[in-house]
Image: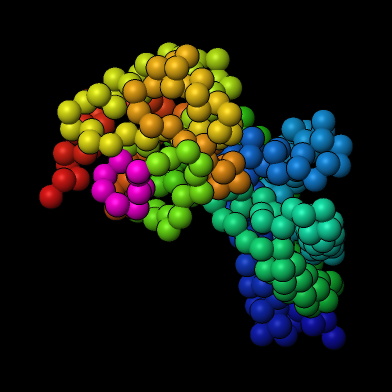
Amino acid sequence: MQLSSNRVLYVTARVLESIVGLVFIVAALMKALDPGAFQEQIAAYGIFPTLAPVGAWVFIIVEFALAAGLLSNLYPRVIPLLVMAMLLLFIGVTVYGMSIGLGENCGCFGNLVHRGPEQVIIEDALMLIALLFSLVVLWSHRGTGKAIRIAISVVAACVAVAVTALSPHLPVDDIVTQLHPGAHFTAWPVDGLYGKDLNKGTHVVFLFTIQDDRVGADVEKMNAIAQQEAVKSAVGLIIDGTEHLTTLMFEYAASFPVAAIEPRFARPLYRALPRVFILRDGTVTNTWSELPAPADVVQAIQSATP
């Protein structure tokens, strides 16, 4: 007797497969929308770091295709085994990351979601168990419409390529980063910012890097924003370290206080720099993924003022 002939077992197996497929497709989509961050996370493990860009693309495409295979029940003996192998790989990499001190973020969902390694291992283990159950139940099941299911996986792979390639041009920073309207940060690990409490009052914050070739022109634009009458407080946060603060104040003549923010805290806040945002009593009210016009910032401040 085939286990898949039992309606309850069949439905349960397909639901479990679909849940894992949805998790994989969401994870792949988050990585595809911010492939740069995923490349950095792969390179951080130190295993063939020069291959990180290629590895990021391969993982994203494979995750999309395998997720589509799970959702459509394509090759019920093969696809679950491949996904299980990938989950075992993820667990192994997570354990290795713990051994070298990389325990803060697995990169599974890009920069949107951060989880500890223990949580990642537990979640992957649960998905392994779910797929093992589904594999046993569906082992002898033969569905129809295989050509359509193959086409779905091929289309999913093509979507992965398109989204990854177009991601720099898509306005999704508020979706795939932790910096978005409504976000609240209880602590800002910064060095060199004196007399400013970012959790009180209204602040226009410039998050940027001094390594950008356009930093001089960008600081001029930031100065124009900071000097608006409606802007009572403007703050710069650089990701490059305190040794560059003097350079910003004197060589580039920043007219606003600048501090160095801890890179590990800053990285989940952006896909590319600079980013500009307004903090009101510690809560983000507005964000820009490029330097906005001063009038836009003034309008945002005034619209948020009770």
Q: Up-down: is 173 above or below 109?
A: above
Seen in the image, is 146 located left or right of residue 116?
A: right
Whether 247 is among the magenta residues is no
Q: Residue at x 51, y 20 (%)?
A: 247
Q: Residue at x 72, y 57 (%)?
A: 103
Q: Position of residue 245 (x, y in %)?
A: 50, 28
Q: Is residue 167 visible?
A: no
Q: Residue at x 17, y 28 (%)?
A: 229
Prevalent SS, magenta region: loop
Q: Up-down: is 62 above or below 99?
A: above
Whether 201 is among the magenta residues is yes
Q: Position of residue 257 (x, y in %)?
A: 38, 32
Which portion, as a residue range, is magenta? 195-203
Q: Up-down: is 150 above or below 228?
A: below
> Who is closer to the viewer here, 20 or 92?
92
Location of residue 92 by image quarter: bottom right
> Who is closer to the viewer here, 104 or 231?
231
> Who is closer to the viewer here, 54 or 144?
54
Q: Position of residue 11 (x, y in %)?
A: 65, 78
Q: Is residue 112 visible?
A: yes
Seen in the image, is 239 located left or right of residue 92?
A: left
Figure coloring: rainbow
> Who is closer to the viewer here, 84 or 272?
272
Q: Quadrant of the N terminus?
A: bottom right
